[in-house]
């Protein structure tokens, strides 16, 4: 296939490519037809990977999306699953369903084990998937800053499994508190510590406070859920450091209004089954949640290229890998800089990078010159803190309170990938707002032995 036979496209606004409709979009790509097209393999169906795949929908390429999960996940709302506000199906959608109408795309449910850059193949165990262009959008996991042993006692929140496990852990803590006769153990069971004061941390703290102080208020007979202690720990001087100080202070004030204890300038020294040691003070807690840091996937190891301290691949301005111009790394997996600073690991960065990488590929196939280096257009940050309160920071708006919360609702509803999910989430939020109830309070593990049990309380030294 020559460059002249490829479908034309329009370039607009520098790096963003918008494709003209063409008849081949309606053609079924059988296997023999796919073999004669340039092969674009996308590893990871998060925000960036799925956006790249969809942006290639009208391109004369064969797209293969590989993910070890069968669903796309709207991560910004995971905390609501963990705190029983939403069910997993309401914030996720099957990848195959999302790409059902895209005739040039296929989906593999598999885990990548290695990449053979010499032969341009992605390895799925014994199977090899050839590529002409490769986009790695494999995301990130939790980082415990050299204390991986803490993960057993302080799980993070990056997947549906993480969220449902946390939901069960939180709900089981209240159930175990109802059963125990030991006042000290009951207090430990009703203490929840969240480590990390970024958006995920403040959203989790606010949601747990409302779950305990409102939704569960009248459900128990032997304990008072409103006496639950929620502690939010942040190592820096302010919460949500990406926001202006004024909004950070309003966030702190609102959390205090919800009954959350906020500890800034506080470093965690130890986490174990009995609780948390921070700044020399021991807090007995049976539920500790990690929201303090992330580490990129193993993509850098697969490629054998330089990475930063968070294991993110150091990419060139066009998001390609040094020495491998046909391999692109995007989203949380990439260390891309703008004005001397690394781009944040947020959904908007991944979405824009996915569109950009797809545009570069189509431009190269048609013999066009590469667009200008990738540039992130910051649309602002937002976070919600409990019921009817949020903070919004954009170029024009720096607001908090109810109006910011309504704006937060509108943006998150808009970005949900499936119309059914939008309707379901909107209904659940309206129901929760009117009734103060959470409808997804399910404990789903099969192993009932995992319920919290009393832990012998011992003295712990402040020294490690």
Image (cartoon, rainbow, N blue to C red):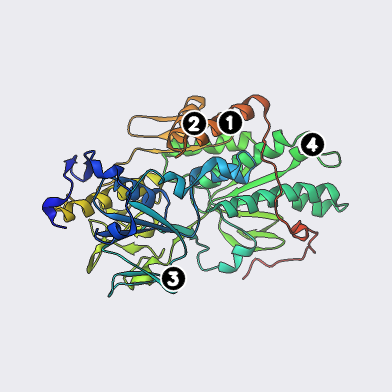
- Mark 4 falls on what kind of element? loop
Q: Are marks 1 and 2 in contact (CB under 8 Å)?
A: yes
The residue drawn where x is 80% and y is 54% is 185
- The first of marks 3 and 1 along the sequence is 3
Inter-mark Cα distance, 4 to 2: 28 Å
**Residues under labels 1 and 2: Cα distance?**
9 Å
N-term-proximal mark, 1 vs 2: 2
The span from disc 4 to disc 1 (Cα, nearest Å) is: 21 Å
- Residue 204 marker: none
Residue 238 at least partly seen: no
- What residue is disc 4 on? 219
How many C-alpha atoms fall within 10 Å of the one at disc 3: few (<14), some, or many (≥20)? Answer: some
Badge 1 is on which residue?
429
Q: Name the residue tied to disc 2.
A: 409
Q: Reply above or below: 138 against 215.
A: below
Tell me, yes or no, whether the two marked residues, 4 and 1, touch with CB atoms within 8 Å. Answer: no
């Amino acid at each position: 296939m020559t460059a002249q036979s490829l479908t034309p496209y329009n370039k607009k606004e520098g790096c963003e490519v918008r494709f003209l409709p063409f008849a081949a979009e309606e053609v079924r790509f059988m296997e023999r037809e796919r073999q004669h097209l340039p092969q674009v393999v996308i590893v990871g169906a998060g925000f960036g990977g799925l956006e790249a795949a969809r942006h290639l929908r009208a391109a004369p390429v064969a797209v293969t999306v590989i993910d070890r999960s069968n669903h796309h996940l709207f991560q910004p709302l995971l905390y609501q699953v963990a705190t029983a506000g939403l069910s997993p199906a309401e914030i996720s959608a099957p990848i195959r369903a999302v790409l059902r109408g895209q005739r040039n795309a296929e989906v593999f449910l598999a885990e990548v084990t290695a990449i053979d850059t010499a032969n341009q193949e992605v390895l799925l165990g014994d199977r090899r998937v050839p590529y002409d262009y490769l986009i790695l959008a494999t995301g990130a996991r939790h980082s415990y800053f050299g204390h991986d042993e803490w993960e057993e006692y302080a799980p993070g929140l990056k997947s549906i499994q993480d969220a449902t496990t946390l939901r069960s852990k939180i709900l089981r803590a209240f159930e175990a508190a109802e059963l125990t006769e030991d006042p000290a153990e009951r207090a430990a069971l009703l203490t929840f510590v969240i480590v990390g004061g970024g958006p995920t941390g403040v959203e989790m703290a606010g949601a747990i406070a409302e779950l305990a102080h409102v939704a569960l208020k009248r459900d128990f007979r032997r304990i008072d859920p409103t006496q639950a202690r929620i502690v939010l720990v942040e190592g820096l001087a302010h919460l949500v450091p990406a926001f202006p100080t004024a909004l950070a202070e309003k966030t702190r004030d609102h959390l205090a209004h919800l009954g959350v204890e906020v500890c800034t300038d506080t470093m965690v020294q130890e986490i174990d089954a009995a609780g948390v040691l921070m700044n020399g003070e021991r807090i007995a807690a049976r539920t500790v949640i990690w929201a303090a840091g992330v580490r990129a996937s193993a993509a850098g190891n697969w490629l054998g290229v330089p990475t930063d301290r968070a294991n993110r691949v150091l990419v060139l301005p066009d998001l390609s890998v040094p020495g491998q111009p046909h391999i692109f790394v995007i989203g949380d997996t990439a260390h891309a800089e703008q004005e001397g600073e690394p781009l944040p690991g947020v959904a908007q960065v991944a979405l824009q990078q996915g569109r950009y990488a797809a545009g570069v590929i189509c431009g190269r196939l048609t013999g066009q010159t590469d667009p200008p280096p990738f540039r992130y257009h910051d649309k602002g940050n937002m976070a919600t803190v409990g019921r009817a309160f949020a903070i919004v920071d954009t170029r024009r708006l720096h607001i908090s309170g109810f109006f910011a919360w309504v704006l937060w609702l509108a943006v998150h509803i808009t970005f949900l990938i499936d119309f059914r999910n939008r309707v379901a989430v909107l209904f659940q939020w309206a129901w929760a707002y009117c009734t103060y109830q959470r409808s997804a309070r399910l404990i789903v593990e099969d192993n009932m032995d995992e319920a919290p049990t009393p832990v012998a309380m011992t003295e712990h030294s402040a020294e490690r």
